[in-house]
Image (cartoon, rainbow, N blue to C red):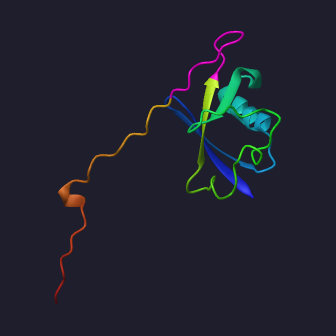
């Protein structure tokens, strides 16, 4: 089954899909293709637990299934880059913006039409 992910870093969000048997390193290669950041300079982690995803594990081993990584509700993964030989950035994600309320003119009305 296909799994769907939103990979988040500060204001950037990447949408990727992969299979349950895909290794984390392969997901990093996809990110390298998009961002141009080498695999060894990336760290992926679960946003809610800050658990680092190990390169040699499959996405299924990391707990991602078709039930928690759906197309309509992708699983969120945090992305940080290496800042020197040993340290990585802190995970920082800018929240999505909330759209303003609709103007009254655009709100649906419950008017009954009579002929």
Q: In the image as oriented, which residue stretches furthest toward the bottom?
A: 115
Task: Answer with the quarter of the image where residue 37 lies.
Answer: top right
- Viewed as shown, does residue 95 lie left or right of 90? left
Pick the front one: 46 or 7: 46
Spot occupied by residue 53 in the image (x, y as percentages of width and height):
71, 34
Spot occupied by residue 76 in the image (x, y as percentages of width and height):
58, 42
- Viewed as shown, does residue 111 lie left or right of 28? left
What type of secondary structure mainly makes up the magenta span?
loop
Name which residue lies at 59% across and 37% down. Answer: 49
- Viewed as shown, does residue 55 lie left or right of 81? right
Asked if residue 91 lies in the magenta stretch, the reply is yes
Task: Answer with the quarter of the image where residue 50 lies.
Answer: top right
Name which residue lies at 70% across and 47% down. Answer: 63
In magenta, the rendered stretch is: 81-92
**Looking at the image, is 110 positioned above or below residue 51?**
below
Task: State which quarter of the image contains the C terminus.
Answer: bottom left
Pick the front one: 107 or 9: 9
**Looking at the image, is 114 positioned above or below residue 74?**
below
**Looking at the image, is 43 positioned above or below residue 63?**
above
Spot occupied by residue 101 in the image (x, y as percentages of width and height):
26, 51
Name which residue lies at 75% across and 25% down. Answer: 39
Pick the front one: 44 or 51: 51
- Viewed as shown, does residue 33 lie left or right of 70? right
């Amino acid at each position: 089954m296909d799994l769907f992910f939103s990979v988040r870093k500060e204001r950037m969000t990447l949408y990727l899909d992969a299979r349950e048997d895909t290794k984390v390193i392969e997901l990093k290669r996809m990110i390298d293709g998009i961002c141009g950041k080498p695999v060894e300079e990336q760290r992926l982690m679960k946003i809610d637990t800050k658990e680092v995803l190990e390169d040699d594990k499959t996405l299924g081993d990391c707990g991602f299934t078709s039930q928690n990584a759906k197309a309509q509700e992708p699983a969120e993964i945090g992305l940080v880059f290496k800042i020197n030989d040993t340290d990585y950035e802190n995970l920082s994600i800018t929240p999505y913006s909330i759209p303003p309320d609709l103007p009254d003119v655009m709100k649906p009305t419950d008017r009954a039409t009579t002929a």
